Amino acid sequence: MSVDQETVAKIASLARIRVDEDQQVALAGELSNILEWIELLNELETEGVRPLTSVVEMTAPQRDDVVTDGDRVDDIIANAPDPANSFFAVPKVVE
């Protein structure tokens, strides 16, 4: 697939970037090369190949989900300038 100067101008317009006309010609060639490379990738046989997140087989380390520092509401609310029933009271911002 080849990209022409008109297509580059349309892409630039959609992306809301300014590309000078002399740069459009060079950019058209670069985009064409990228699309040719992608077409080569489409020719590869990928049937039965599992998707990978890494080339090295690994599992993410996991830890037990345990509460280690909870039930300290009174200590936390003691720092509030205006506590209200175990909640932080804040000024009204919407009228």
Image (spheres, rainbow, N blue to C red):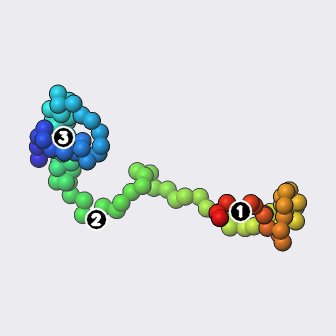
- Please state which amino acid type lies under the numbered disc 3: Ala
- Disc 2 to disc 3, how far (Cα)? 40 Å
* 73 or 67: nearer the viewer: 73
Disc 1 or 2, which lies upstream in sequence? Answer: 2
Considering every residue shown, the one lying at the far front of the view is 95
Q: Secondary structure at mark 3?
A: helix
Q: Which residue is mark 2?
A: 48
Mark 1 is surrounded, within 10 Å at the Cα level, by few (under 14), some (14 to 19) or many (20 or more) other residues, namely few
Residue 86: which quarter of the image?
A: bottom right
Mark 2 or mark 3, whichever is nearer to me = 3
* 89 or 22: nearer the viewer: 89
Considering every residue shown, the one lying at the far bottom of the view is 85
Disc 2 or 3, which lies upstream in sequence? Answer: 3
Query: Do the residues bearing badges 1 and 2 touch, measured as CB atoms within 8 Å?
Result: no
- Please state which amino acid type lies under the numbered disc 1: Lys
Q: Which residue is mark 3?
A: 9
Residue at x-position 85% and y-position 57%: 81
Q: Which mark is residue 92?
A: 1
Query: Do the residues bearing badges 3 and 1 touch, measured as CB atoms within 8 Å?
Result: no
Mark 3 is surrounded, within 10 Å at the Cα level, by few (under 14), some (14 to 19) or many (20 or more) other residues, namely many
Regarding residue 44, the answer to whether it shows in the image is yes
Residue 95: which quarter of the image?
A: bottom right
Regarding residue 33, the answer to whether it shows in the image is no
Residue at x-position 68% and y-position 67%: 65
Q: Secondary structure at mark 2?
A: loop
Considering every residue shown, the one lying at the far top of the view is 22
Residue at x-position 15% and y-position 32%: 25
Q: Secondary structure at mark 1?
A: loop
Disc 3 or 1, which lies upstream in sequence? Answer: 3
- Examine the rendered structure and indicate whether residue 87 appears above or below residue 10: below
Mark 1 or mark 2, whichever is nearer to me = 1
